[in-house]
Image: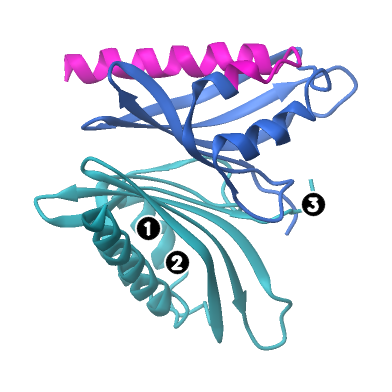
Chain colours: A blue, B cyan
Amino acid sequence: MAQDSKIAQTIINLEKAALDRWGKGDPSGCLELCAPEVTYFDPFLDRRITGLDELTRYYENLRGKISIDRYELINPAVCVAGDVAVLTFNYVSYSKDNEPSRWNCTEVYRNFEGNWKIIQTHWSFTRPKA
Amino acid sequence: MAQDSKIAQTIINLEKAALDRWGKGDPSGCLELCAPEVTYFDPFLDRRITGLDELTRYYENLRGKISIDRYELINPAVCVAGDVAVLTFNYVSYSKDNEPSRWNCTEVYRNFEGNWKIIQTHWSFTRPKA
């Protein structure tokens, strides 16, 4: 369990470092964390994205367009299952002139020879309108 | 890879069987698939549900209230990572007198001594209003 706790902290630190860059308009932190076989959902897509190439094309269109003043990662939990660690949390971002933006997030990390990489990302709005 | 393909089919069959019961107002199929440590998101909650006890209380309130005529599980994909299998798909449900309901879904399954159980569920609307 001490080992799981250490993994949990590693995973949360990786996620925060990527989100810090994301909030400054830089998607590379997120992309560098992803495995080639990553799958991805967010609320702006008609369907799942499958694979890092497709996700890269999508994220490159957002480069320089995101500006987040600060965010909260609420109650992050990591479930370690062998070489996989499943991170879940609620998230709120704050930006000038906008209402706070509230999200649900799942990140499935897999350990590839010592490097944790994301194989599944799911971002959704918390209580959107139907 | 043949083994992964067999696991993928097993996982998809488990999911469909639970969804079939769900569409008839019976949440027990989903609950029986979950591990005690399951975490859960859907668009009607203010925050993550943590643990099968909390999810059971939530789902029992829905018992008998769901009626789905038919659904499509679109492009399901299973990523097998050791004892974990990550199922993702888009989903559309059809019910009398309602517009089709479109969803994104992530289900993280873990193999517990031969029994696949869900440790993370994330349902969200496809392209909801912000």
Instruction: Tell me whether the residue at label 3 lies in contact with that at label 2, contact meaning CB atoms closer than 8 angstroms.
Output: no
Residue B28 position in % (x across, y down): 31, 70
- Residue B129 numbered mark, or none: 3
Q: In the image, A103: left or right of B50?
A: right
* Quadrant into which the C terminus of chain A falls: bottom right
- Tell me which amino acid carries mark 1: Arg
Q: In the image, B105: left or right of A66?
A: left
> Mark 1 = which residue?
B57
Residue B63 position in % (x across, y down): 42, 74
**Between B105 and B42, the one nearer to me in the picture:** B105
> Label 3 crowding class (10 Å Cα cut-off): few <14, some 14-19, many 20+?
few
| Residue placed furthest toward the left | B113
Q: CA distance from mark 2 to mark 1?
A: 7 Å
User: Disc 2 sits on a residue from what chain?
Assistant: B
Q: Quadrant of residue B46?
A: top right
- Residue B61 numbered mark, or none: 2
N-terminal-most mark, 3 or 2: 2
Which residue range is magenta in the image? A1-30
Helix, strand or loop under label 1: helix
N-terminal-most mark, 3 or 1: 1
- Tell me which amino acid carries mark 2: Asn
Q: Which residue: 54% across, 52% down? A: B42
Q: Is residue A44 in view from this perspective?
A: yes
Q: CA distance from mark 3 to mark 2?
A: 26 Å
Q: Is residue A23 above or below residue B38?
A: above
